[in-house]
C-alpha cells in the first residue's frame, strides 16, 4: 500500500510537470502570439498574421534565397528589395510601421526617426536582444552588456579610442596600407592597368589594421583567428535564421559541435595573446600604444582605484571579459571598416567626377607624402563622400532592440519581450527626409555637415545613436580616409565589366560577388 502511494505521488508529480510544460509550450507557440497580434491590431498597428511556431521566418528565408540567386540587372543604389525582400514587400503593403513575427516573438518595425532616436537613447527600456545564445558568443563584450556592467566596460574602453590615442596607431594604419599598395603597384607594373577584387583586399587590409592597431601584430600572425571568425559567422547566420528552442545549443548536432570547437579555439588563441601581454607588462616592459595595451592599462588603473577605495576588484575586468573584448575588437573592427571602404571604392568607381574631386583634395593636402593625422581631419570632400556612402550603404541595415519592460513608444504600447527593428537603410533613403533624389549618390548633401544635411532632424544613424553609439566610429573613419587617400594618390579606377552589383547582408552589408575594380596607375 505504501509503495502504491509513493508511486501514485510520483505519477501525479510527473503528470503535473508534463501538463505545466505543455501549457507553457502552448502559451509560447500560440496563445501569447495571438493575444499580442490582437493587441497590436487594436492599437491600429498593421502586421502579418502569426503562423504557428515559425511566424514569418520561412517567408523571410525563402524570399531572401530567391533574391540572392542573381545580381541586380543594373547598377542602382535602391537595393532594399534584394537585401530584405520580405520587409520591403511589407512596407509597400502595410506602410512604414508594422509588426511581423520572428518565430513566436513579435518584431515591430519603427521607421520614424524621432522614435528611433528615443528608443536608442532609452537604453534601459530598449536593450540589446538576447533571443539566442549564439549571438552572445558571436558578439561578446561591450556590445552585449547592459546596465552597470556596460557602463563599467564602456568607461574603461573609451580612452583607447580618444583622438590622441588614434594618432599613436597611425603608423599601424600606414604599414598595412603600404603593403597593399605595393601589391597593387606590382599588379599594374607591366601594362599600367590591372583588375583587383577590392573586397578581398579590403577584408584582409582591415584585418591587418585591426591586428596591428589592436594587438601589435600582423594579419599573418592573427590569420587563424580571422579564419575561425569567418567560419563561425557563417554558422551563426544559419543558426540565427531559425527558431531557437531553450536548450537547443546543448544538442550535439554537427553544427553545434563545430561552433563550440571554433569558440574553444578562439578562446585559446585570444587567451594566449592577452596572457603574453600581461607577462610583458609584469616584466616591466612599457605599455604598448595599441588597443589591447590601452585596455589593460585602463583596466589596471580601475582595479587599483577600486583597491584604494576598498571596493575590491569588481570594478575591473576579469581575464574572460578582457578576452571577450579582444574578440569583439577582431570581429567588429574588421567587418565594419572593410564594408565602408569597399562601398566607397565601388561608388567612386561609378561616379568618376567625385573620384576626381577627392583626388584633387588629397593631392593638394598631402602631395605624394604619407597622409598625416591633421591632414586626414581636414579632408572635407573625402568626409562628405564617406558620409554619403554610409547613408546609402550603412554597415548595419537594421538595428534591433528588445523591450525590457512594458513601455510605450509613440502611440504604440509595447509588452516586455517584444523585439523592435529600426530600418536604418530605409530611413537613410526616405524621400520625406532626404528628397526625391534620396537614392542618388550626392555627397554635396553633407557640404555643411551632418546637422545641415538632415535639417537637424536626426535622420542619419550609420553608427547607431545615443549612449550605445559605436565606440569605434572615429577609428573606422580615420582608417577609411587613410586607405582612400593612399589609393587616390596612386591610381584612378573604374568598375570592371565583370563586376556584378549584388549587395547582401551577412551580419553587415557587403558585395555578394566581390568588387572587381580596374586600376590605372597615375
Image: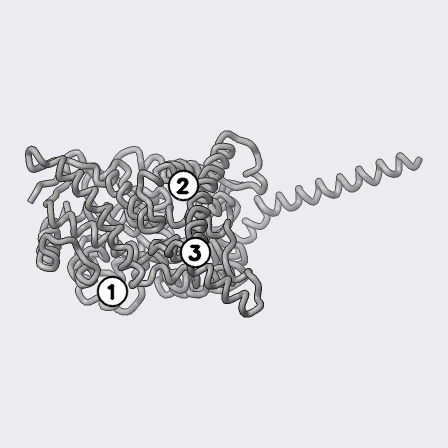
Number of the front mark, 1 or 3: 3
Q: Which mark is residue 450?
A: 1
Whole-percent x, y for residue 370 in the image: 16, 53
Q: Quadrant of residue 290?
A: bottom left
Which part of the image, by quadrant, shows the N terminus?
Answer: top right
Whole-percent x, y for residue 248 in the image: 56, 38
Q: Taking the image as drawn, is residue 198 in sight?
A: yes
Q: Is residue 368 above or below residue 243?
A: below
Mark 2 element type:
helix
Is 381 or 176 nearer to us in this picture? Answer: 176
Mark 3 element type:
helix
Whole-percent x, y for residue 229 in the image: 39, 40
Which comes sooner in the sequence, label 1 or label 2?
Answer: 2
Which comes sooner in the sequence, label 1 or label 3?
Answer: 3
Q: Which mark is residue 202?
A: none
Is 30 or 182 nearer to us in this picture? Answer: 182
Mark 1 element type:
helix
Q: Give the number of callouts.
A: 3
Quick one: label 1, few (<14), some, or many (20+) residues within 10 Å? some
Q: Quadrant of residue 435?
A: bottom left
Q: Which residue is mark 3?
A: 296
Q: Which residue is mark 2?
A: 60
Number of the front mark, 3 or 2: 3
Whole-percent x, y for residue 46 in the image: 43, 54
From mark 1 to mark 3, how far is it between C-alphas? 35 Å
Q: Are marks 1 and 3 in contact (CB under 8 Å)?
A: no
Quick one: label 3, few (<14), some, or many (20+) residues within 10 Å? many
Amino acid at each position: 500500500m505504501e509503495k502504491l502511494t509513493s508511486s501514485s505521488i510520483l505519477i501525479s508529480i510527473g503528470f503535473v510537470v508534463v501538463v505545466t510544460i505543455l501549457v507553457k509550450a502552448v502559451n509560447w507557440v500560440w496563445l501569447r502570439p495571438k493575444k499580442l497580434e490582437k493587441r497590436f491590431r487594436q492599437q491600429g498597428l498593421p502586421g502579418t498574421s502569426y503562423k504557428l511556431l515559425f511566424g514569418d521566418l520561412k517567408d523571410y528565408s525563402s524570399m531572401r534565397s530567391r533574391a540572392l540567386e542573381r545580381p541586380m540587372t543594373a547598377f542602382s543604389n535602391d537595393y532594399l528589395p534584394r537585401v530584405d525582400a520580405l520587409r520591403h514587400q511589407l512596407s509597400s503593403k502595410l506602410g512604414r510601421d508594422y509588426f511581423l513575427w520572428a518565430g513566436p516573438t513579435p518584431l515591430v518595425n519603427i521607421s520614424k526617426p524621432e522614435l528611433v532616436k528615443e528608443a536608442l537613447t532609452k537604453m534601459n527600456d530598449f536593450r540589446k536582444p538576447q533571443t539566442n545564445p549564439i549571438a552572445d558568443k558571436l558578439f561578446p563584450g561591450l556590445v552585449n552588456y547592459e546596465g552597470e556592467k556596460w557602463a563599467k566596460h564602456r568607461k574603461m574602453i573609451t580612452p583607447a579610442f580618444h583622438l590622441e590615442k588614434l594618432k599613436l596607431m597611425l603608423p599601424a594604419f600606414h604599414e598595412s596600407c603600404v603593403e597593399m599598395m605595393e601589391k597593387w603597384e606590382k599588379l599594374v607594373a607591366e601594362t599600367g592597368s590591372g583588375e583587383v577584387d577590392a573586397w578581398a583586399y579590403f577584408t584582409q587590409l582591415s584585418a591587418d589594421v585591426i591586428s596591428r592597431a589592436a594587438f601589435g601584430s600582423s594579419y599573418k600572425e592573427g590569420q587563424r583567428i580571422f579564419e575561425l571568425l569567418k567560419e563561425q559567422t557563417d554558422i551563426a547566420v544559419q543558426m540565427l535564421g531559425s527558431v531557437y528552442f531553450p536548450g537547443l545549443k546543448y544538442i550535439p548536432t554537427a553544427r553545434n559541435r563545430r561552433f563550440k570547437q571554433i569558440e574553444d579555439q578562439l578562446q585559446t588563441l585570444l587567451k594566449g595573446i592577452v596572457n603574453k601581454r600581461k607577462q610583458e607588462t609584469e616584466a616591466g616592459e612599457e605599455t604598448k600604444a595599441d588597443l589591447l595595451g590601452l585596455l589593460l592599462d585602463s583596466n589596471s588603473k580601475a582595479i587599483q582605484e577600486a583597491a584604494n577605495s576598498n571596493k575590491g576588484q569588481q570594478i575591473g575586468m576579469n581575464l574572460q571579459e578582457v578576452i571577450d573584448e579582444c574578440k569583439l575588437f577582431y570581429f567588429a573592427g574588421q567587418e565594419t571598416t572593410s564594408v565602408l571602404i569597399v562601398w566607397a571604392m565601388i561608388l567612386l568607381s561609378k561616379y568618376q567626377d567625385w573620384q576626381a574631386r577627392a583626388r584633387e583634395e588629397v593631392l593638394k593636402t598631402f602631395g605624394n607624402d604619407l597622409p598625416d593625422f591633421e591632414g586626414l581631419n581636414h579632408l572635407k570632400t573625402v568626409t562628405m563622400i564617406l558620409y554619403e556612402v554610409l547613408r546609402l550603404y550603412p554597415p548595419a541595415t537594421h538595428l534591433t532592440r528588445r523591450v525590457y519592460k512594458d513601455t510605450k513608444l509613440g502611440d504604440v504600447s509595447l509588452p516586455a519581450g517584444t523585439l523592435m527593428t529600426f530600418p536604418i537603410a530605409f530611413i537613410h533613403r526616405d524621400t520625406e527626409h532626404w528628397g526625391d533624389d534620396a537614392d542618388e549618390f550626392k555627397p554635396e548633401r553633407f557640404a555643411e555637415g551632418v546637422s545641415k544635411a538632415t535639417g537637424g532632424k536626426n535622420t542619419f544613424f550609420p553608427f547607431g545613436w545615443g549612449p550605445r553609439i559605436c565606440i569605434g566610429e572615429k577609428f573606422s573613419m580615420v582608417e577609411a580616409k587613410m586607405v582612400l587617400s593612399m589609393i587616390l594618390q596612386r591610381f584612378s579606377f573604374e568598375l570592371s565589366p565583370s563586376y556584378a552589383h549584388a549587395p547582401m547582408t551577412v551580419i553587415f552589408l557587403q558585395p555578394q560577388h566581390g568588387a572587381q575594380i580596374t586600376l590605372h596607375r597615375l
